[in-house]
Amino acid sequence: MNGKQEKTMEAYCVKCKAKQEMADAKEIKMKNGRPATTGKCPKCGTKMFRIGKAK
């Protein structure tokens, strides 16, 4: 393996109204310092957001 691991995380897609696995998931920090994950829905392309560290 390359040593590079893609982080997969599920989040709720508001448009699809179902839990989907995020595409292009990136770990970010919110203004208050808490960790969060942001990405896109693989089906419809809507922006997804989930509070908490990526597992």
Image (cartoon, grey):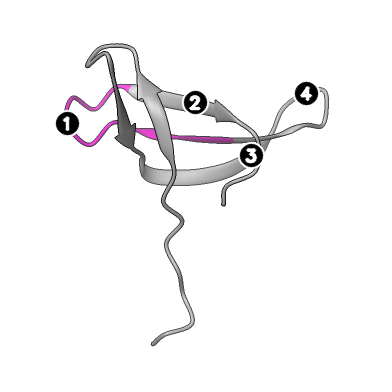
The residue beneath circle 2 is 49
- Residue 14: % across, % down: 33, 12
Labels 4 & 2 near each other (Cβ < 8 A): no
- Work out which residue is located at the far bottom of the displayed protein and give it: 1
6 relative position to 28: left or right:
left
Residue at figure coordinates x 25%, y 12% from the top left: 15
Q: Distance between the Cα atoms at labels 1 and 4?
A: 29 Å
- Can you tell which quarter of the image residue 43 is in? top left
Q: Quadrant of the N terminus?
A: bottom left
- Residue 40: % across, % down: 34, 33
Labels 3 & 4 near each other (Cβ < 8 A): no
Q: Residues within 10 Å of mark 4 (few under 14, many from 20)?
A: few
Q: Distance between the Cα atoms at labels 2 and 1?
A: 15 Å
The numbered disc on residue 31 is 4
Give the amino acid type for the residue marked by disc 2 in the picture.
Phe
N-term-proximal mark, 4 vs 2: 4
In this rendering, the label closer to the viewer, 1 or 4: 1
Give the amino acid type for the residue marked by disc 3 in the picture.
Ile
Magenta stretch: residue 41 in it? yes
In this rendering, the label closer to the viewer, 1 or 3: 1
